[in-house]
Image (cartoon, grey):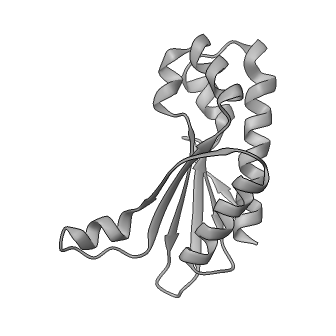
Amino acid sequence: MTTDPEGLVTLQSRTAAAETFERLVRAVQSRGMTIFARIDQSDAAGAAGLTLRPTYVLLFGNPKAGTPLMQAAPTIAIDLPLKALVWGEAQGAAQLAYVDPVWLARRHGLDPDRYPVVQAMAKAIADVAADAVG
């Protein structure tokens, strides 16, 4: 696992991109979170006559957790719901990336009294990512 200065957390998966993405979907669903969108970027590229390695984005979260954050700092809505990106590597394995919710809270100037919710979100996304990559 690596985390860059902009809060991007990246994990190496033990499986190919499509399987990693399906594992991510199941991990989110098993925790009762809402899936807002599944985006197959490689499919969209193909429809435009272009090629792209397998690349998927999942938008998910819990409105009961995210809405109070948006009420406190409306700009955080640009980064919520949570997103996870899965992309295929040339050798067949995949990577999974997401932005750390604690970094998002700082980015949008959330008051420290909101951090318990943010830390719970951070744990939730870390857990689903760990499940997805095996």
Where residue 2 appears, as percent x and y from the top left, is 66, 57
Q: Residue furthest left?
A: 49
Of 88 and 1, the residue lying toward us: 88
Instruction: Report the residue at 77% width, 64% height from top.
Output: 131
Horizontal arrangement in the rendering, residue 81 relative to residue 62 (left or right): left
Q: Residue at x 65, y 30 (%)?
A: 63
Q: Quadrant of the C terminus?
A: bottom right
Count of numbered circles on the image: 0
Res. 108 visible in picture: yes
Judge whether residue 8 can be spotted in this image.
Answer: no
Residue depicted at 59% across the width and 63% down the height: 96
- The answer to which image quadrant residue 12 occupies is bottom right
Instruction: Give the x, y percent position of residue 109.
Output: 59, 16
* Percent of width and height locating residue 128: 74, 56
Which of 50/97 is in front? Answer: 50
Q: Is residue 13 above or below residue 85?
A: below
Q: Is residue 94 left or right of residue 44?
A: right
Residue found farthest to the bottom: 91
Residue drawn at (74%, 40%) of the image: 122
Query: Quadrant where the N terminus lies?
Result: bottom right
From the viewer's perspective, is residue 3 above or below residue 120?
Answer: below
Q: Nearer the viewer, residue 58 or 120?
A: 58
